[in-house]
Image: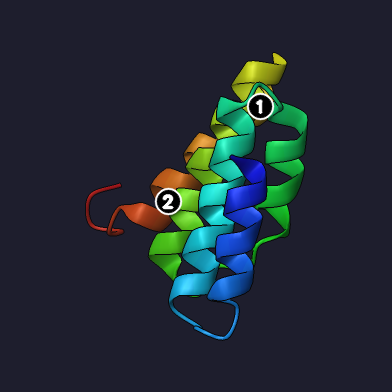
Amino acid sequence: ALRLADDFCALVENDPDEYPCRLRDRGNLLLKCGRPAESVAFISKLVPQDTFRAGLQQLEMAQGLIALGSGAEARACVDAGKRLLLPTTLT
């Protein structure tokens, strides 16, 4: 599955909208494959294109950190994700 994800990333690497999404998918796939440390490291290196994607990235990293047993770091990521995803009038 990871090889297919890598192949798909290579296929769309010149598409500025699709490529970051496929990279993010690969990071989430690492988590599903039981490799949370690699997932967190991979997702943390992605450069979000907008605030919404940055918020999602924080929440995705939190999932990996929870799997690693890093509760405090996961909570910090969730808090950062909420700040990015929720309008300031709602926080």
Helix, strand, or loop for circle 1?
A: helix
Q: Quadrant of residue 2?
A: top right
**Among numbered discs 1 and 2, the one appearing first in the sequence:** 1
Q: Looking at the picture, does residue 8 appear above or below residue 50?
A: above
Badge 2: residue crowd in 10 Å (few <14, some 14–19, many ≥20): some
Of the 4 image quadrants, the one containing the N terminus is top right
Q: Are marks 1 and 2 in contact (CB under 8 Å)?
A: no
Q: Looking at the picture, does residue 26 appear above or below residue 70?
A: below
Find residue 71 and report its horizontal and vertical position in percent. 64, 18
Provide the residue designation for mark 2. 83
Residue at x-position 59% and y-position 65%: 9
Disc number placed over residue 47 in the picture, else none: none
- Determine if residue 31 is in view: yes
Question: Spatial distance from mark 1 to mark 2, Cα to Cα?
Answer: 19 Å
Residue 65 relative to residue 86: left or right:
right
Q: Residue furthest top?
A: 69
Q: Looking at the picture, does residue 53 appear above or below residue 30?
A: below
| Residue sitting nearer the eye, 61 or 83 | 61
Residue at x-position 55% and y-position 27%: 32
Helix, strand, or loop for circle 2?
A: helix
Provide the residue designation for mark 1. 65
| Residue sitting nearer the eye, 44 or 82 | 44
Amino acid type at mark 1: Leu
| Residue sitting nearer the eye, 90 or 61 | 61
In front: mark 1 or mark 2?
1
Amino acid type at mark 2: Arg
Find residue 24 and report its horizontal and vertical position in percent. 54, 54
Q: Quadrant of residue 34?
A: top right
Find residue 15 and report its horizontal and vertical position in percent. 50, 83
Residue 27 relative to residue 85: left or right:
right
Q: Quadrant of residue 17?
A: bottom left
Task: Give the image's coloring scheme.
Answer: rainbow
